[in-house]
Amino acid sequence: DTEVTQTPKHLVMGMTNKKSLKCEQHMGHRAMYWYKQKAKKPPELMFVYSYEKLSINESVPSRFSPECPNSSLLNLHLHALQPEDSALYLCASSQVYSGYTEAFFGQGTRLTVV
Amino acid sequence: SQQGEEDPQALSIQEGENATMNCSYKTSINNLQWYRQNSGRGLVHLILIRSNEREKHSGRLRVTLDTSKKSSSLLITASRAADTASYFCATDAGAGSYQLTFGKGTKLSVIP
């Protein structure tokens, strides 16, 4: 199984809502990532988890809260988002192995904040 | 911050022609990778070239790496309409790192 599964595929939420994005992989990868991608732009790294511990937070606002409950799951909790947070949110996973970091991506969650 | 810079930003070719995309980066790397993204979907890993390699092939793909110029190129030969996508180079942050930073991408359109 070489898939990274993200749910939901699409999400529309109001600025006062709380929602969560979910990501799952069963490749035994111990690094998992959240990326944000705006239209016609490259993915931008948000968070990196290594061995279920947050290792990198790229100065992401606190209205985005990541969680890694176990080695297969990664969540992104959303609260009080702004319309400019509308984007494609991509989850990825890889081995924790310096020098060979092929990442496997999910199909993304298309988030619209209204 | 974005490490890689691709050019051209957009490329339109006829089916059967070759497509070449370039990527430049700024700092030392362990490896450089190329990914493809179909419209609005996830990224798919295409090929990885290590910093001590100069050229690598995979099917219709050929990647070169020039670490002295901090640049790489991706050549797709005999393009097909299904190759229409955005292509991104991605670099790691050097020794001990496993996070990727993506370039701005090249949008390739292959006209049947």
Image (spheres, rainbow, N blue to C red):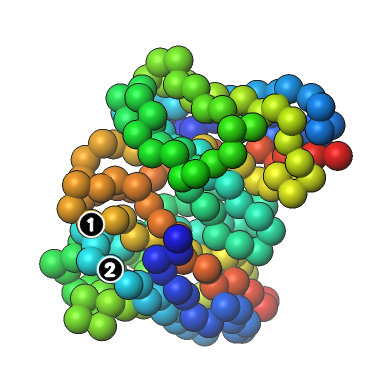
- Front residue of A83 and B112: A83
The kind of residue tagged 1 is Gly
Residue A75's quadrant in the figure? Answer: top right
Residue pushed farthest top? Answer: A69
Q: Position of residue A22 (x, y in %)?
A: 58, 25
Which mark is drawn over residue B27? 2
- Residue B26 vertical placement versus A7 (above, below): below
The answer to whether residue A87 is left or right of residue B67 is right
- Label 2, secondary structure: give it: loop
Q: Badge 1: how crowded within 10 Å, few (<14), some, or many (20+)?
A: some
Instruction: Specify whether residue A28 is in view.
Output: no
- Residue indicated by mark 1: B94
The answer to whether residue B38 shows anywhere in this view is: yes
Residue visible at 21% across and 76% down in the picture? B67
Callouts 1 and 2 on one subunit: yes
Q: Position of residue B77 (x, y in %)?
A: 43, 77
The residue shown at (70%, 45%) is: A85
